[in-house]
Image: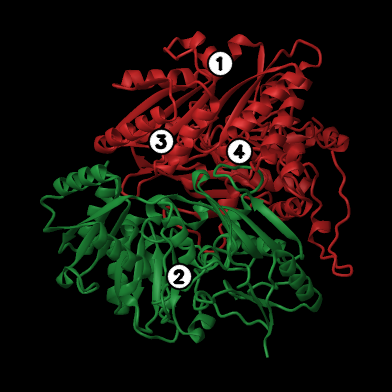
Chain colours: A green, B red
Amino acid sequence: MIQTWSPRTADEAAACVQQAMAADLPMELVSAGTRRSFGRPVDAAARLDLSALSGVVTYQPEELILSVGPATPMAEVAELLAGRGQCLAFEPPDYGGLWGGKAGEGTIGGAMMTGRGGPRRLTAGGPRDHCLGVKGVNGFGQAFAAGGRVVKNVTGFDITKLVTGSFGTLCVVTELTLKVLPAPPDAATLAVLDLSDEAAVRLMSRALGCAAQVSSAAHLPAGIASGFEGRAATLLRVEGVSPSVAARIGHLSQLFEDAGEQVLLDREASQRLWRDIADVAYFAGEARPVWKLSVPPAMGARIGARLTQDLAGRCFYDWGGGAIWLEVPEAPDGHAAGVRQILAEVVGSDGHATLMRASPQVRASVPPFQPLAPAVAALTERVRRQFDPQGLFNPGRMYA
Amino acid sequence: MLMPAPDEGLIARRGEFVAALRAIVPGEGVIDDDAELAAYECDGLTAYRQRPMIVVLPETVEQVSRTLAYCHKVGLKVVPRGAGTSLSGGSLPLADGVILGMGKFNRILEVDYENRCAVVQPGVTNLAVTHAVAGEGFYYAPDPSSQIACSIGGNVAENAGGVHCLKYGMTTNNLLGVELVLIDGTVLRLGGKHLDPQALDLLGVVCGSEGLLGVVTEVTVRILQAPETQRALLMGFPQVEAAGACVAEVIAAGIIPAGMEMMDRLAIQAAEAFVQVGYPLDVEALLIIELDGPPAEVDHLIDVVREIGLGCGASYLRVSQDEEERRGFWAGRKAAFPAVGRISPDYYCMDGTIPRATLPKVLRRMGELADSYGLRIANVFHAGDGNLHPLILYDADKPGELHRAEELGAAILTLCVEVGGVLTGEHGVGVEKRDLMEVQFGPADLDQQQRLKCAFDEDGLLNPGKVFPKLCRCAELGRVHIHGGQVRFPELERF
């Protein structure tokens, strides 16, 4: 029987942690629990259910800040922001479908603690770039705060960045302050069809290096998406006020006049398409292992070719080639050895491969996160211990 | 400003340290001559000076690593230094410490347009990065006002900002990777040309750590295509409140300008007297709002912002028609500091951030504070992101006036925290705001920051006396205390 604590306030959360310290009882930190398939399975005798730490603490659109409890549903956050024409600029992905669940059920805390951004992460930054402050309880049983509630702040160490993306292994987060930004009023996407992966990555590099201010660039090889008649599509998104969107799409269209057949997607079609890319909808409804590689963008196609050929997988590219989403056939190690071998051969240590979908057995037996260089691993462990010396929070979630 | 008490035992061993360091960094790379050491006795915060015991100027990563490992072994304190432009005393030396000057790391190692990044050594100046890529139409976005002199390594240490960071981010948002040397000489790499950390975001916490966590020996930054067009509006308002309302309405309209700067009456008068760019002299607040991007976008937004400005009661409004006029708008703002220097023998530049809505209240209260201290304040303000730069005018030759200016500065920063803001938006804590940290942070908050320090530098040898009002004692911080559910720590000694 798993012991579950359900604190209703930050003070109660601190009291729970102090009890866990006294009993030396490791805990799994959860709220909606929609991201439990991400990372290693946690083996803990107790559960800290943070679901009650939900709700908006303060939302000040003119100050561009939002403070919320970590268990606030992402859907509620999105709706609140949309009501004032704002958004989370890092375009939080929803992997519910990828993991065989439903979309739209996650929390803001889960999104920030898993630290992933969608297609616009390329140009707008990730969760780490939009988290301004955290309040939490560390493994010393102390409630502490880091960062602040203003958009520009360099006071003290930037612990907020460290906590963002830490998968709940440093502290129990009880409040988050986020930077919110105006949602682009208009958007459009230019698709160039039938390019090879190499040609697509070159085109995306050119597009991202020109003055058109492309906000996202992805390439869907033939057969990945059902749209575009199953043909390969290289996608360039521009966002902003309507006159600007039109002018920039015109610029891109002219620049790539001879590159291939072009299709223009309007705002709505564009939104649907990038939502699918963010959520990796193309690999949903299956159980096969899925990897995400982050690499220098120009290397994308070369690695993608090796991955698909050597491992019999299929992949698509986001972030101008810098993100590779790869689906591979079942294997006892989820093809961890093969994926990381190819990564090392092509880019050395400049990149990483994360296992984004696999059975709990596979995620327990191979490291879902890229193994760290020994010196970085040692430092990471020292840092973790300075937050949680007894290893009470999500033990083993990131590394065994 | 009290620094940790110098260790006379270490000072007595100077000769031994110099000999050992010369074996690591040959030739002129180790300085122990008093006259030469004097060049390093302060940084951009010139009110505080201290001659260092030794200066080491390494040229290779191996020399940095061996120097740090040696200092670690013998217990020598190390103060890293970039170009020495810190406004918060981040590289103020220690009488019993080594200055590790990174000025010889001055090469641009690689410009990679395909991956839109540049790999540079930390001693390269901020502006040199932009110059290196400008030919291809690129630039490096963070633009602190010292950009002609300040180094990228220092930018990383301080998480430097600039007038464009509301739209384009601070250093941390434009930093892709570093090579870092720890105090024990360990060399490691964080990030690279790819995005996102492998595990914990150590790069995120190294940036802005003010030389307390490690020494950066290589930096990878992202470069951006320069915007096609830049245009600016110059707007004067009869009341500060109206200017503040205009800023809020621009943001509420969904516009994030490339720059949005405010100046108060005294700053306007000083700037106009200095550079004569045609600023209106009959207004209480002046706004410069710059928009950049494709011409279609800029032209559209200029019209929107103009309407907002008029709606908010702008009594003066000009839109730049060409580059010369746009530069003119900025010339006064950019000359604001030296302009204030003309009307006062000395000035002290502050750097708090506030919620923008509190601006009228803060300016009013600041005026009252200035009166009570018998000093004047000119205000320039990164209005878009709420970052205030009050310039306190004083005369160091008048007995007690520097002290009063410092007290007024502390009162202003305390006010910033009281209204929901923070002590520093872009200049860093350094020694300048060190003793105010407890105004913003509680004991548990500072304990957690110091614990992080312990993970990187357990002996507290890197830049001690900066950022934290108390030296950290890692053994005590690392202990878990439980007394009847209460977690306690022994009171630590102050400077």
| Label 1, label 2: how far apart the Cα atoms are | 52 Å
Q: Position of residue B404 (x, y in %)?
A: 77, 21
Nearest to the eye among marks 1 and 4: give it.
Answer: 4
Q: Judge left or right: residue B109 versus residue B411.
A: left
User: Could you tell me the amino acid type at mark 1?
Assistant: Pro
Q: Amino acid at mark 4?
A: Ile
- Of tags 4 and 2, the one toward the viewer is 4
Circle 1 is placed at which residue position?
A: B338
The kind of residue tagged 3 is: Ala
Mark 3, Cα crowd under 10 Å, few <14 / some 14-19 / many 20+, is many
Q: Residue at x 67, y 61 (%)?
A: A136
Q: How much space separates mark 4 and mark 3, taking CA atoms?
A: 19 Å
Please identify the residue farthest to the bottom as the structure is shown: A1
Q: Amino acid at mark 2?
A: Thr
Look at the picture and state if A148 lies above or below B153.
Answer: below
| Above or below: residue B314 compared with residue B197 | above
**Disc 2, SS:** strand
Callout 2 touching callout 3 (CB < 8 Å):
no
The label nearer to you, 1 versus 2, is 1
Residue A309 is labelled as none
Tell me what residue is drawn at x 24 percent, y 72 percent: A225
Q: Check whether the beta carbons of the residues at disc 1 and disc 4 lie within 8 A of each other.
A: no
**Pointers 1 and 3 within a single chain:** yes
Residue located beneath label 2 in the image: A354
Q: Nearer the viewer, residue B360 or B62?
A: B360
Q: Residues within 10 Å of mark 2 (few under 14, many from 20)?
A: many
Residue for badge 4? B354
**Residue at label 3?**
B258
Q: Is residue B196 left or right of residue B390?
A: left
